[in-house]
Amino acid sequence: MQHSTGKIMKCAMCGKEESTPGTFPMVIGVGRICLSCGMEKVTCDVCGQEVKRLTSSRFQGKNLCLRDHMKEVEKYKQHIVKTFDEDSESVEEILHRSLTDAPLGYTLVTVKRARNSMHVWEAEYEKSEILQSRCS
């Protein structure tokens, strides 16, 4: 939740004006809402849990509880880095695992030695459709 510091805002749900600037909290994907609208219950479209609107978000057209919001946001990350330790497995195993254990929807871009390390490797993945659009 973020609070406004500037002008007087209207509730995104009911249109009620705040009495002093910064009293209406921000709900992600909804906007600034008054406390009475914030206390209304909404159902998470992913897990079905009922939560207060203040502790929910609207993302990609869905009402989400905070836990599912974090999961959904994670799905839209463009770049992921996984680390592998050469002390635990050989370089050949690291290269093989970096290819076979790629996150769903991502393409391996590079495997390289981690910065300032003698034994840690990093596998970098990029969202497949973004990589394909850049390479076309």
Image (tube, rainbow, N blue to C red):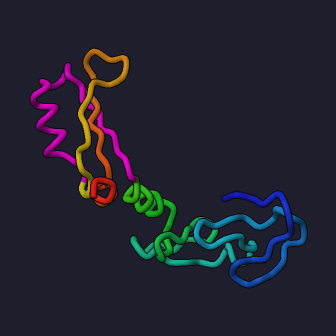
Q: Quadrant of residue 75?
A: bottom left
28 and 44: which is toward the camera: 28
| Position of residue 114 measured from the top left corner of the image (x, y, whole percent) | 32, 25
| Position of residue 83 measured from the top left corner of the image (x, y, whole percent) | 29, 33
Q: Residue at x 25, y 37 (%)?
A: 110
119 and 136: which is toward the camera: 136
Q: Quadrant of residue 73?
A: bottom left
The vertical placement of 101 against 67, above or below, is above
Q: Which residue is drawn at 38% across and 52% down?
A: 78
52 and 30: which is toward the camera: 30
Q: Is residue 22 found left or right of 133 in the rendered image?
A: right
Q: Residue furthest bottom?
A: 14
Q: Which residue lies furthest to the front in this view?
A: 136
Q: Which residue lies furthest to the right in this view?
A: 19
Query: For the magenta stretch, what is the residue range?
Result: 78-103
| Position of residue 7 measured from the top left corner of the image (x, y, whole percent) | 86, 65
Q: Is residue 19 found left or right of 39 in the rendered image?
A: right
| Position of residue 38 measured from the top left corner of the image (x, y, whole percent) | 68, 73
The N terminus: image quadrant:
bottom right
Q: Which residue is drawn at 79% across and 76% down?
A: 10
Q: Does 50 appear in magenta?
A: no
Q: How many labels does the image show?
A: 0
Q: Residue at x 58, y 70 (%)?
A: 29
The C terminus: image quadrant:
bottom left
